[in-house]
Image: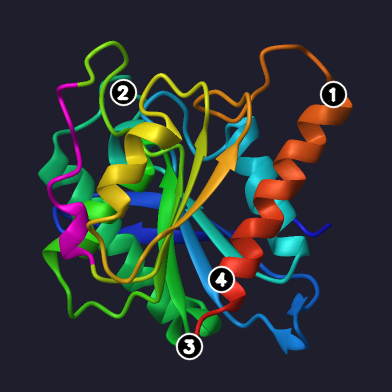
Amino acid sequence: MPSPSELSVRLETGAATTALVYHAVRPAATSDTETAAALILGHGAGAGQRSAFMVDFATALSTMGVDVVTFNFLYTEQGRKIPDRAPALEACYRSVIEAVRAGVDTARRALFIGGKSMGGRIATQVAAADPQRPIAGLVLLGYPLHPPGRPAERRDKHLPAIARPMLFVQGTRDAFGTPDELAPVLKTMRPAPLLHVVERGDHSFKLSRKDPAAQAAIYAEVQRAIVTFVSSAP
């Protein structure tokens, strides 16, 4: 498996962050249709793009035929622990989108954005704020509907404004929002989003009981769902 290539991303402030491009190593097929798309995945609040989850998912998806790009939000790139405020996170994500569109050929055909937890939430905010931005769809891995233990503090008002295909992957034990909590929100959205439920999965789709074979199967199922979704791009 080739190592990802680095892509330097210049931000609006003049600072720079690093993106990693996991180039597709073979075409993936869904009903005889080859995937020719790029997917940007932003990391969660507590771990950067080189976390095991991000590397494993980016690597697996690239072997299934999708060009995957991960990146560090600036606070992570600079070694800070506390995330920047939403405007700075959104500006960083927008800069990554522009850099990927310029530097990754498949992104000009079909560009999907999303991420793990906070990274996915910021992607939704970027998409909702600019309906004209050429985004083919969104992939949200553990969408943080609310902070743990505070279900009334919802992060869903902007979701109906996105108006693009969306895939939500949510564990039934996710403290940030279960599939049952998400379902009423998704009913208000058009086009109708897809919801992939990870039975017994937590916020990172981990099972409550340690079972490496079962865990690997869960991740593989999620990754196939992502590739199927991306392959459906018109």
Is residue 161 in the magenta section? yes
Q: CA distance from mark 4 to mark 2?
A: 33 Å
Answer with mark 4 or mark 2, whichever residue precedes in sequence: 2
Residue tagged 1: 212
Residue tagged 2: 80
Q: CA distance from mark 3 to mark 1?
A: 37 Å
User: Which residue does the image show at 12% across and 63% down from the upper left?
Assistant: 129
Instruction: Decide: few, some or many residues near mark 4? Use Cα within 10 Å; few <14, some 14-19, many ≥20.
Output: many
User: Which residue does the image show at 27% across and 54% down from the upper left?
Assistant: 124
In the picture, measured across the screen, residue 164 lies left or right of residue 194, that is left
Q: Label 1 amino acid?
A: Pro
Q: CA distance from mark 1 to mark 4?
A: 27 Å
Residue tagged 3: 109
User: Which residue does the image show at 23% across and 50% down from the upper left?
Assistant: 15
Residue segment shown in magenta: 152-162
Answer with mark 4 or mark 3, whichever residue precedes in sequence: 3
Q: CA distance from mark 4 to mark 3?
A: 12 Å
User: Which residue does the image show at 19% across and 32% down from the upper left?
Assistant: 84
Answer with mark 3 or mark 1, whichever residue precedes in sequence: 3
Vertical placement of 170 versus 96: above or below?
above
Q: Main secondary structure of the magenta part?
A: loop
State the residue in front, 128 or 37. 128
Q: Nearer the viewer, mark 4 or mark 2?
A: 4
Vertical placement of 4 versus 72: above or below?
below
Residue tagged 4: 230
State the residue in front, 161 or 51. 161
